[in-house]
Amino acid sequence: MVLHDQSVDITEAVDAMDAHLKYLGYPFHAIHTGPLIRRESVYANDLTEDRKRLFNALFHFTRRLDIKYLCPKIKKSDCSDVIDMTGKLSKAIRNSLSEHNDFWNGFDKVIVYYDNGQVELTKILSSVFNTYFTNEY
């Protein structure tokens, strides 16, 4: 999860990244690192050098920004089924949120943006954020 204080303007950096992606031949593109690394999906026919350029562009973009991130994790092999995995991932996200409670308390409002790419993850995020933050997000 990428955390960004919206009072910090990152428009210039985003515009520069969009221009760089267009230059690399990926206009209007959101980089998905899993498929990029595994050479899947839209990256299936890309050369290693091209994929490396995208990865480096994303790395340098995020390194320069005033953002924070959380990366809750579980072991899929420890899950007996999708219900068990959903529960464990929900708990991992909840625990990550609570570990950074001081950070969250610095804001009047938390807004969640998600592209609804994975139905189960959409449900998890909605459930966890709605129960963790009692005010609107």
Image (cartoon, rainbow, N blue to C red):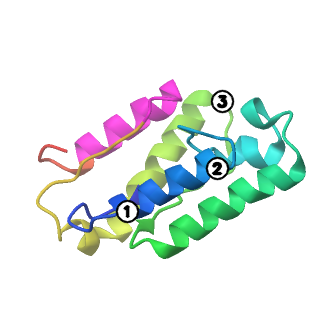
Q: Secondary structure at mark 2?
A: helix
What residue is disc 1 on?
A: 12
Judging depth in this view, the residue of 131 and 17 nearest the camera is 17
Q: Secondary structure at mark 1?
A: helix
Q: Is residue 1 visible?
A: no
Amino acid beneath label 3? Asp
Q: Secondary structure at mark 3?
A: loop
Q: Residue at x 53, y 29 (%)?
A: 118
Sort mark 3 into few (<14), some (14-19) or many (20+) by Cα contacts within 10 Å: few
- The residue at the far top in this view is 119
Amino acid beneath label 2? Tyr
State the separation of the CA atoms marked 2 and 3: 43 Å
Q: What span is in magenta?
A: 115-131
What residue is disc 3 on?
A: 81
Task: Tell me if label 2 and label 1 are in contact, CB under 8 Å.
Answer: no
- Lower position in the chain sequence, tag 3 or tag 1: 1
What residue is disc 2 on?
A: 23
Q: Position of residue 30 (x, y in %)?
A: 56, 42
**Vertical comparison of 16 with 30: above or below:** below
Q: Residue at x 45, y 50 (%)?
A: 91
Q: Does residue 94 appear to the left or right of 105 in the view shown? A: right
| Of labels 2 and 1, the one closer to you | 2
Amino acid beneath label 1? Glu
